[in-house]
């Protein structure tokens, strides 16, 4: 018998430790101030953030936008994939802007959900998602001229007011943080803001000839790639996306049967121009620019006479090739997008909601705990512990599964507090009846748990059923409610039934209790 | 140790007639209220429109807010004040905001490609049209003035670039075959927006310098290149209702005196969908309970539980109407939670009655039912009490956004508790009295 208790207590103990462990990340993350966050290693920070409870936009503040892609103007064969292309265009811009943890999702066949935490500036968001998708081919400046310009920037900076304040600017400042490798300029991710600032300076601008511009490559997605590409290209577009008829990713290039490639087909009209362009620039690189981001800058190997080009992707994966093909097609066949739903919550409002929700949980919780302790005495306290653990495990589970906690989700926790005690009420009332009928405590407890169990099962099943339907129906916020309610119900089996039972059995055995206060 | 209900022997079944009157009255009041209010007080989730929550840094009375809002052009807006603070919610239902757009798009730029590709006998014409308010659906061109042109003379060009609703580019080609050297050609252009407004026509002219099979780059050049500067305002981003209102408030109270805390915009398509989904989800919830009940209950208890379920949902909706609680997606969540709660309560009472039927075979049916209700009374009351308690707290301190949810569910919990005592069991009793089941066998 004693053996049995040991492992049962051990299970409870382990679950609690795991729950607290999981929740410690949330606590650690929440106590961080913005300054501390800025100082922290970004990889560590994002790891911590991933383990903390994820707050919905209604609590963290931010924008939630649903876009609809209008395919009515596209031919049926072009309409296919229009949503994916629009999504790629939007993703490209949002990546560019460096919004932290954006959500960009396809919903159904023609909708895109965009969630931008922290952003409440509507005009900025519209700029990100509503602007014209512009795909251009631009000539990359050759290496001799690029080196010349970098040198000029270095000189300009060494003569500037910056050099007087900071001696590092005196000598080759720019070329030491923007390293040219003959193809692109590599800039460490941490130096990107500085380079951007320097390029905006008037003295630097005047060092660059007026027909060229600096353009960034995409923001590196994986954290292990620490550099971002910067290209120096001629402003004049050689061709635009309208030139492209089709772009497809494939395997097997003319040089390597296993190589990944993207095949581009151009319109008959553009093919002539392309032949002239490629003919005149053999050995040069041509940048494929989407919304001022260089997606790829392949080298021209030969004159392309028929409008059929092949981009060899080198060491890239098939996924990279597919993404490039999608971007090329997006530039060729943009589909209009329209905002059909937009919800913006300001940061103050979000904080207020958190405070109000937490207050409701604390006050509601305390009142219920108090009531249970008064009404059921010691047994009530056992139920109270179970209830407190229920909320702990519920929160830990939320952060473990990266579920989103929303304001209705907080309401779900409040409701869980009110209803989770139901199981204990059912059991305790049953035990009271059994003792009144003259049974011993051990048998009364056995009977109480046993007889109440089917009723609890029914009650929880119906609540779970309605929560599942709500999950199917609901928008993000309502889903948050359905999730907390469901987890609360499932956890209550463990806390309200298993935990309290173990405790009662153990107490009855250990102290040989003949009387129990229920 | 506290015991509120110890060995009660209340004749609940005996009260059933009174209960029927109460239920009937509540239902009737609800229906009357819904009719009197012309339906429920739907939020923008279901009507479509904008909800803007504004915070002022000083106290401003409702009338003043209302007058500024209606001066700004939102006459039908509903303005609500939250508590003592300076917070207002401004609700603009879709009908209130109709963009009056009667002007068509304007041609802002048009030119002939100066450098057509060698060997092609086509002239490329670029057109750019601009419309501030609506999406441009088509750009048209014709070689005959539009007034004289027949339908077949007018050719539609679909804008090439359709991300931007305000500025659209159209590109078309004109065959050089049949054109005479030295001829001055006029191309008439105009654009149409998505509302069907036709813009003022414009035209460009150019001189054909050479023609024939060998038409080439230099043969055709643009004589007149009408190049209207793109309207500066085209770079202006369309403003949302909240931004427009914020500007209006700031004009009156000064910059920085207003903060938009929340702005929801729900388009008509989404609101239609949400309406449809809301009805479905409630029906689906009831259906799911029906299926569950048919597995778990005997026929009579099942029917009684479902009747009680309808009773609870309908009366709650009636109360929602009576207290003018706003109906939005959160309210639907509350109704669905109520559906689960109502069945759950019915199950507890019915389970006990069924248990007693087996145990007390010799007793009179009414006594058995009464005893079942009495035995579960303290559980029913305690659980309802704790649930009601937390909902009450939530309604009090949880903030305005969630209040509709907690109020709806509070009504639901009261009605649900009442129905599991006064509706479910009496229906079974009525049924039993009307047609006794053999040996009181109930599954």
Image (tube, rainbow, N blue to C red):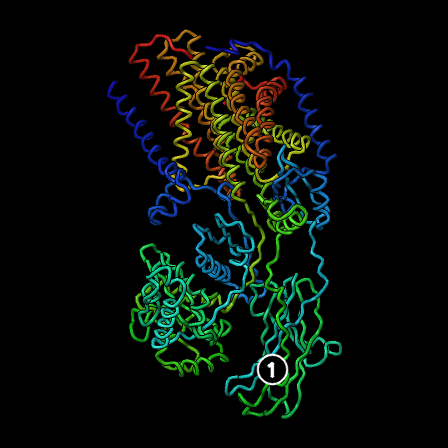
Looking at the image, residue B284 sits to the left or right of residue B40; the answer is left
Residue at image location 60% in from the left, 63% down from the top: B165
* Image quadrant in which the N terminus of chain A is located: top left
* Residue occupied by mark 1: B174
**Residue A323 visible here:** no
Q: Considering depth in this image, is B86 or B160 the residue closer to the camera?
A: B86
The percent position of residue B370, horizontal first and vertical second, equals 56, 13
* Image quadrant in which the C terminus of chain A is located: top left
The percent position of residue A171, horizontal first and vertical second, equals 32, 66
Looking at the image, residue A382 sits to the left or right of residue B407; the answer is left
Looking at the image, residue B259 sits to the left or right of residue A103; the answer is right
Looking at the image, residue A158 sits to the left or right of residue A473; the answer is left
Task: Please determine whether, in this image, residue B377 is positioned above or below residue B76.
Answer: above
The percent position of residue B198, horizontal first and vertical second, equals 71, 68
Mark 1 Cα-neighbour bin, 10 Å: few <14, some 14–19, many ≥20: few
Q: Residue furthest left?
A: A3
Residue at image location 32% in from the left, 27% down from the top: A12
The kind of secondary structure element at disc 1 is: strand
Return the chain for callout 1: B
Task: Please determine whether, in this image, residue B220 is positioned above or below residue B234.
Answer: below
């Amino acid at each position: 018998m004693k053996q049995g208790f040991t492992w049962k207590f051990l299970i409870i103990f382990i679950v609690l430790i795991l729950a607290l462990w999981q929740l410690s990340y949330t606590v650690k993350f929440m106590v961080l101030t913005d300054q501390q966050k800025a100082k922290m290693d970004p990889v560590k920070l994002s790891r911590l953030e991933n383990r903390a409870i994820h707050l919905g936009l209604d609590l963290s503040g931010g924008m939630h936008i649903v876009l609809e892609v209008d395919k009515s103007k596209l031919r049926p064969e072009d309409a296919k994939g229009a949503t994916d292309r629009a999504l790629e265009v939007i993703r490209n811009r949002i990546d560019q802007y460096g919004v932290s943890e954006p959500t960009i999702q396809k919903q159904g066949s023609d909708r895109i959900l965009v969630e931008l935490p922290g952003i409440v500036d509507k005009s900025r968001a519209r700029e990100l998602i509503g602007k014209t998708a512009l795909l251009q081919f631009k000539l990359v400046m050759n290496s001799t001229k690029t080196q010349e310009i970098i040198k000029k920037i270095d000189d300009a900076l060494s003569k500037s007011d910056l050099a007087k304040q900071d001696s590092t600017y005196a000598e080759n400042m720019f070329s030491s943080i923007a390293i040219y490798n003959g193809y692109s300029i590599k800039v460490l991710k941490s130096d990107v803001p500085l380079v951007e600032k320097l390029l905006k300076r008037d003295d630097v601008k005047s060092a660059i000839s007026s027909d060229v511009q600096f353009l960034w490559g995409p923001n590196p997605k994986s954290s292990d790639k620490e550099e971002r590409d910067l290209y120096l290209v001629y402003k004049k577009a050689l061709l635009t996306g309208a030139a492209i008829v089709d772009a497809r990713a494939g395997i097997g290039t003319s040089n390597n049967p296993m190589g990944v490639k993207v095949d581009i087909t151009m319109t008959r009209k553009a093919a002539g121009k392309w032949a002239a362009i490629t003919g005149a620039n053999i050995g040069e690189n041509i940048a494929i620019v989407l919304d001022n981001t260089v997606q790829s800058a392949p080298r021209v190997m030969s004159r392309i006479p028929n409008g059929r080009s092949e981009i060899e992707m080198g060491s890239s994966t098939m996924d990279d090739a597919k993404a490039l093909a999608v971007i090329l097609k997006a530039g060729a066949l943009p589909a209009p997008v329209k905002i059909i739903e937009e919800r913006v919550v300001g940061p103050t409002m979000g904080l207020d909601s958190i405070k109000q929700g937490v207050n409701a949980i604390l006050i509601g919780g305390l009142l219920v705990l108090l009531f249970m302790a008064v009404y059921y005495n010691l047994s009530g306290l056992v139920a109270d512990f179970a209830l407190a653990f229920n909320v702990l495990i519920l929160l830990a589970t939320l952060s473990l599964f990266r579920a989103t906690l929303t304001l209705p989700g907080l309401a779900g926790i409040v409701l869980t507090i009110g209803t989770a005690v139901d199981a204990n009420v059912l059991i305790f009332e049953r035990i009271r009846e059994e003792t009144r009928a003259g049974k011993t405590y051990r048998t009364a407890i056995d009977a109480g748990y046993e007889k109440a169990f089917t009723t609890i099962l029914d009650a929880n099943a119906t609540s779970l059923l309605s929560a599942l339907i709500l999950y199917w129906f609901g928008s993000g916020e309502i889903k948050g409610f359905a999730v907390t309610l469901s987890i609360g119900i499932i956890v209550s089996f463990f806390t309200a039934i298993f935990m309290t039972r173990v405790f009662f059995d153990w107490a009855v055995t250990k102290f040989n209790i003949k009387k129990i206060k229920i | 140790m506290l015991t509120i209900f110890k060995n009660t022997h209340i004749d609940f079944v005996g009260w059933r007639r009174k209960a029927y009157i109460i239920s009937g009255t509540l239902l009737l009041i609800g229906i009357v209220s819904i009719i009197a209010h012309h339906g429920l007080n739907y939020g923008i989730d279901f009507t479509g429109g904008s909800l803007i929550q504004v915070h002022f840094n000083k106290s401003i009375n409702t009338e003043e807010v209302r007058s500024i809002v209606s001066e700004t052009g939102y006459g039908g807006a509903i303005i609500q004040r939250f508590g003592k603070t300076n917070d207002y919610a401004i609700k603009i239902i879709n009908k209130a905001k109709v963009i009056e757009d009667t002007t068509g798009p304007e041609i802002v730029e048009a030119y002939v490609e100066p450098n057509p590709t060698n060997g092609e006998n086509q002239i490329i014409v670029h057109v750019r049209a601009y419309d501030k308010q609506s999406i441009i659906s088509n750009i048209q061109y014709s070689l005959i003035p539009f007034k004289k042109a027949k339908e077949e003379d007018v050719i539609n060009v679909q804008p090439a670039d359709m991300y931007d609703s305000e500025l659209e580019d159209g590109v078309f080609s004109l065959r050089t075959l049949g054109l005479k050297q030295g001829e001055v050609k006029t191309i008439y252009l105009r654009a149409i927006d998505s509302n069907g407004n036709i813009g003022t026509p414009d035209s460009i002219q150019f001189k054909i310098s050479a023609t024939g099979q060998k038409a080439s780059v230099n043969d055709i050049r643009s004589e007149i290149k009408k190049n209207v500067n793109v309207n500066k305002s085209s770079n202006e981003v369309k403003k949302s209702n909240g931004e427009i209102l914020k500007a209006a408030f700031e004009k009156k109270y000064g910059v920085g005196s207003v903060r938009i805390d929340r702005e929801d915009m729900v388009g008509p398509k989404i609101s239609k969908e949400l309406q449809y989904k809301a009805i479905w989800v409630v029906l689906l919830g009831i259906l799911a309970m029906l299926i569950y009940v048919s597995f778990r209950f005997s026929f009579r208890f099942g029917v009684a539980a479902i009747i009680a379920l309808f009773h609870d949902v309908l009366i709650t909706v009636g109360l929602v109407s009576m207290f003018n609680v706003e109906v939005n997606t959160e309210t639907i969540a509350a109704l669905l939670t109520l559906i689960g709660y109502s069945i759950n309560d019915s199950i507890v009472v019915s389970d006990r009655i069924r248990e007693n039927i087996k145990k007390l075979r010799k007793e009179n049916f009414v006594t058995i039912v009464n005893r079942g209700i009495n035995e579960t009374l303290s559980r029913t009351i305690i659980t309802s009490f704790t649930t009601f308690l937390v909902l009450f707290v939530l309604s009090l301190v949880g903030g305005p956004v969630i209040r509709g949810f907690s109020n709806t569910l509070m009504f639901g919990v009261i009605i649900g508790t009442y129905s599991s005592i006064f509706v479910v069991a009496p229906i079974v009793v009525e049924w039993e009295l009307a047609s006794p089941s053999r040996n009181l066998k109930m599954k």
